[in-house]
Amino acid sequence: KPIGCQVDFSGSWAINEDKSVLDNWGTGNLPGALKITQQDNKLTIRKTFTVEYAEDRVEDEELTLDGQENKSEMWNAPLIKTARLSALQDTLFIASKATFNRGGRTMEMTSNENWYLQERGQVLMIIQSSSSFWGKRNISMVYDKQKCD
């Protein structure tokens, strides 16, 4: 990629468990496939989660790449996500925070992701650190770009 050119994460991606560095949860609650469309300042992501005893779960989200807050919901709680590109336009930073109120107690789930393209755009590396009521998680997910039919 020429210096100063914005990366394009568009494509269909499948998780590569062998190359990913996961924790004791393995791929639990991680998308097995991503379908990404990037246009100008907008990123549309379709995440497909494999569910063992039911239909696969699909989540769609839209993010702007300018650091603006993108508000939605997660498990009936407010979710705020921001996405911005690095100064060199070669890394995507996504931060999210969900705030849960249960029985008068407030709990937060936070996540920070750094997205990089590798191997001439054929590999998407996502480094994620998160914190929730289940504990902390630091993982590296590797997705291989899928060839179009």
Image (cartoon, helix red, strand yellow):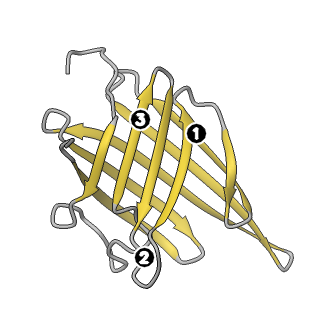
Q: CB under 8 Å between callouts 1 and 3?
A: no
Q: Is residue 18 above or below residue 4?
A: below
Tell which tag, 1 or 3, sits nearer the viewer: 3
Q: Nearer the viewer, residue 123 or 34?
A: 34
Q: Please name the amino acid that badge 3 sits on.
A: Thr
Element marked by disc 3: strand
Q: Looking at the image, tell me whether mark 1 or mark 3 is earlier in sequence order.
A: 3
Element marked by disc 1: strand
Count of marks, rendered view:
3
Element marked by disc 2: loop
Query: Which residue is drawn at the image coordinates 39% and 41% (left, top)?
Result: 36
Q: Please name the amino acid that badge 1 sits on.
A: Thr
Tell which tag, 1 or 2, sits nearer the viewer: 2
Gap between marks 1 and 3 measured at Cα: 17 Å
Q: Nearer the viewer, residue 37 or 66?
A: 37
Which image quarter holds the C terminus? top left
Q: Is residue 147 above or below residue 17?
A: above
Q: Please name the amino acid that badge 2 sits on.
A: Val
- Mark 2 Cα within 10 Å, few/some/many (few <14, many 20+)? few
Q: Looking at the image, tell me whether mark 2 or mark 3 is earlier in sequence order.
A: 3
Residue matched to label 2: 51
Query: Which residue is drawn at the image coordinates 60% and 75% (left, top)?
Result: 133
Give left or right: position of 107 versus 22.
Answer: right
Disc marking residue 82? 1
